[in-house]
Amino acid sequence: MGRRCKATKEDGSPCWSYAITGQPTCYFHTPPHLRPAKKTAEPPPAPESMADAASYLAWICEQTATGNLDDTTARTLVQTMNTYMKAHREAVKEEKLVEKMKSLEEQIKQLQRARQAIQHKE
């Protein structure tokens, strides 16, 4: 680990955060113009599939790990992606149920036609 921040907190106690490389103080005690510039990465487009959501989550992890995305924003985005993924799974389940229902309805119609054909022959 690096060196500790040389600044003191408002209550007079020492700051225990780690200093920015090349600076005597941490991020919070370093004037904004001396802080390392953050690389702002363009977020991926809104997800349209589970694979897109997984890519978005990977982007969030990368941006958080490199310090380009703050923890609060990252948490909010992860919660949003989790909500999207849950809704997507539910929509897929619903689509499968609708397909199954249509298939069963078609089978019922075929059985009814077959039954009517047998009854007409009798």
Image (cartoon, rainbow, N blue to C red):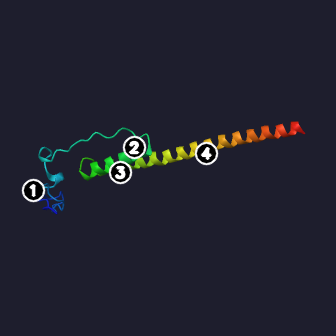
Q: Secondary structure at mark 2?
A: helix
**Element type where label 4 sits in the image:** helix
Taking the spot 76% from the left edge, 42% from the top edge, the residue there is: 111
Closest to the observer, 54 or 79: 54
Q: Which residue is mark 2?
A: 52
Image coordinates for residue 61, horizontal then vertical, percent: 31, 51
Q: CA distance from mark 3 to mark 1?
A: 30 Å
Sequence-wise, which precedes: disc 1 or disc 4?
1
**Residue in the picture at 56% in, 47% down:** 93
> If you read the primary sequence from the N terminus, does the residue marked by circle 4 or circle 3 appear first?
3
Cα gap from disc 4 to disc 2, whole angstroms? 24 Å
The answer to whether residue 115 is left or right of residue 63 is right
Q: Position of residue 60 (x, y in %)?
A: 32, 48
Q: Nearer the viewer, mark 4 or mark 3?
A: 4
Q: Position of residue 53 (x, y in %)?
A: 40, 45
Q: CA distance from mark 1 to mark 4?
A: 62 Å
Query: In terms of secondary structure, where does tag 1 sit?
Result: loop
Question: Secondary structure beneath disc 3?
Answer: helix
Judge the density around disc 4: few (<14), some (14-19), many (≥20) Cα neighbours within 10 Å.
few
Left or right side of 47 for 66: left
How far apart, in angstroms, are the residues tagged by discs 4 and 3?
33 Å
Report the residue marked by disc 1: 24
Q: Mark 1 or 4, which is nearer the eye?
A: 4
First along the sequence among labels 4 and 2: 2
Mark in the foreground, 1 or 2: 2
Task: Pick whichever, 43 or 32, lies toward us.
Answer: 43
